[in-house]
Image: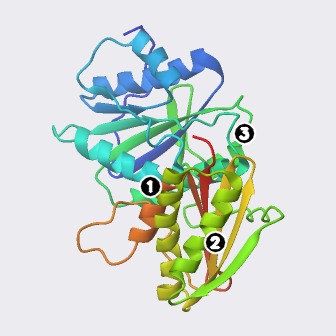
Amino acid sequence: MTDRSSQDTAAPAAGYRHELYPYRGREEFLDGTLGFIQEALDGDEAVVVAVPHEKVSLLRAELPELPTVRFVDTGSVAHHPGRLIDAWQRWIQEHAADGRPVRGIGESPWDDARSRAEIQELQYHEWLLNKAFADSPAWWLLCPYDTEGLHADLKTMSRCHPEVRRNGHSQPYDGFDPEAAYPFESLAPPCDPYDELCYGQGDMAAVRAKIAECARWHGLDATRLRELHVAATEIAANSVQHGGGEGALRTWADGDRMICEFHDRGYIADPLAGRTRPRGAQAGGRGLWLAHQLCDLVEIRSTPDDGTTVRLHTALRV
């Protein structure tokens, strides 16, 4: 491993630590991440690295093959914010099996091609990590964040991370408030024209037909349509069962995405609903879980006063 001095060798404290590492450019990325890895090696800890492919190449060029530094394949989850918490739960469980304390390095691909909706969901994912791992065994996640990126937003990211790494040292992040609600932006209005259908008990066939009509108009292929039908049926059934017995479906296309929006009078109290893998006897949560697995993006807004809106995004070309 290339000699890069480590300045903070403290072992992870009890519980989950979530640390932001703002950086600019290749050298700062390597300085921070390699220093973090060296701290782990000095403390006989394992490291799970989940970063974009080009960053994997940078780190591998600087590191020897080490059994305690494991690079995981992020291909199936990197661009799906709703799948990332479950992935981290699996990675940490797998790599903590030998009893060592575990650190993680996780950088989402905040690339310029991301839509505003995708960026918001990635930011929300960072906030949700604190809830998902609040009662987990101790581990420490470093989140490198390129401050030169087109979508850089340190103010929002400071709300999501209790700690920040600067010059090799960890320190509390003043902008973090564990009691604050997540500052959601309002959903963008539907693109005009859009179709609308009100549905209730016994209307699942009509829901699927309305979606198929929009899919044919915009050229969604048969495989993706089948996946969307499964996800949409689950969300519409949730409206009937938990959302007051009825709901409203809107469908439209926005650029290279087809969007299905469901609204009902229900309220989803658990912000992690659909983001963690349902357990054997678990009641509820399976419909939202399936939606996250089958769609390219899922947006959820839910309040006791306004009810619940779920948007399913499906790419028209894959």
Q: Secondary structure at mark 3?
A: loop
Q: Residue at x 74, y 71 (%)?
A: 195
Residue that label 2 marks: 210
For label 1, the residue is 293
Asked if residue 235 is positioned above or below residue 246 in the image, the reply reads above
Quadrant placement of the C terminus: top right
Upstream in sequence: badge 1 or badge 2: 2
Distance from the alpha carbon under mark 1 to that under mark 2: 22 Å
Amino acid at the residue labelled 3: His
The answer, for residue 180, to whether it is visible in the render is no
Q: Check disc 3 and report the residue beneath it.
A: 151
Whether pointer 3 and pointer 2 mark residues with C-beta atoms closer than 8 Å, the reply is no
Residue at x-position 59% and y-position 49%: 122
Q: SS for tag 2?
A: helix
Classify residue 212 by image quadrant: bottom right
For discs 1 and 2, the disc positioned in front in the rendered view: 2
